[in-house]
Amino acid sequence: MDIIRQNKNKPAPKILIADDDEDVREIMITRLEANGYEVETAENGVWAVVQAKKTKPDLIILDMRMPSGSGESVFDQLKNSIETAFIPVIFITAYSTPAVRQHLLEIGAAEFIEKPFDSAELLEKVRKVIGKNAG
């Protein structure tokens, strides 16, 4: 397994996973924590916004379809708040079309992952986005 080597003086990058599917959250938590990331979760859109403002993650992985706020409405709230406007977001959804993917990238999503996702792809995209925003 490809494990991130963390500098002891530098905290682990923090990721907020916002997805209403507990199984999906658990898979992502396991994979990300095993690779040196600190993970927080939210199971609906309202809690995702609250958690993002509270924990200031380095990255948010945001499901498109959740109770109490669609992924796009949550994204709009995050981008319209000075506290969270600059946190990159990777959208994840099982309901993907090329038009949806293009739209999300055009409105400012950092990346896009389609469910069911491959754990290697998840890690690759997380590293890419966090690496772009480091320093």
Image: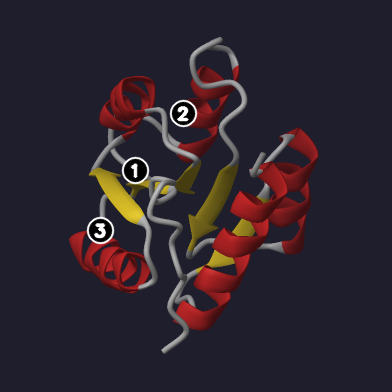
Residue under the image location 62 percent in, 26 percent down: 86
Q: Amino acid at mark 1?
A: Met
Q: Secondary structure at mark 1?
A: loop
Residue 21 shows which numbered tag? Answer: 3
Whether residues under marks 2 and 1 lie with C-beta atoms below 8 angstroms apart, the answer is: yes
> Which quarter of the rendering shows the C terminus?
top right
In the picture provided, is 84 more to the left or to the right than 27? right
Classify 10 Å Cα crowding around label 2: few (below 14), some (14-19), many (20 and above). many
Sequence-first tag of 2 and 3: 3
- Cα–Cα gap, marks 2 and 1: 10 Å
Q: Position of residue 1 (x, y in %)?
A: 41, 89
- Cα–Cα gap, marks 1 and 3: 9 Å
Q: Position of residue 89 (x, y in %)?
A: 57, 42
Residue under the image location 22 percent in, 66 percent down: 26
Q: Amino acid at mark 2?
A: Val
Residue on which disc 2 sits: 74
Residue on which disc 1 sits: 66
Q: Position of residue 134 (x, y in %)?
A: 64, 44
Q: Position of residue 112 (x, y in %)?
A: 63, 58
Colour scheme employed for the rendering of this structure? secondary structure
- Cα–Cα gap, marks 2 and 3: 17 Å
Residue 8 shows which numbered tag? Answer: none
Q: Secondary structure at mark 3?
A: loop
Question: Which is nearer the eye, 98 or 61?
Answer: 61
Whether residues under marks 1 and 3 lie with C-beta atoms below 8 angstroms apart, the answer is: no
Q: Secondary structure at mark 2?
A: helix
Sequence-first tag of 1 and 3: 3
Classify 10 Å Cα crowding around label 3: few (below 14), some (14-19), many (20 and above). few
Q: Quick check: 97 above or below 77?
A: below
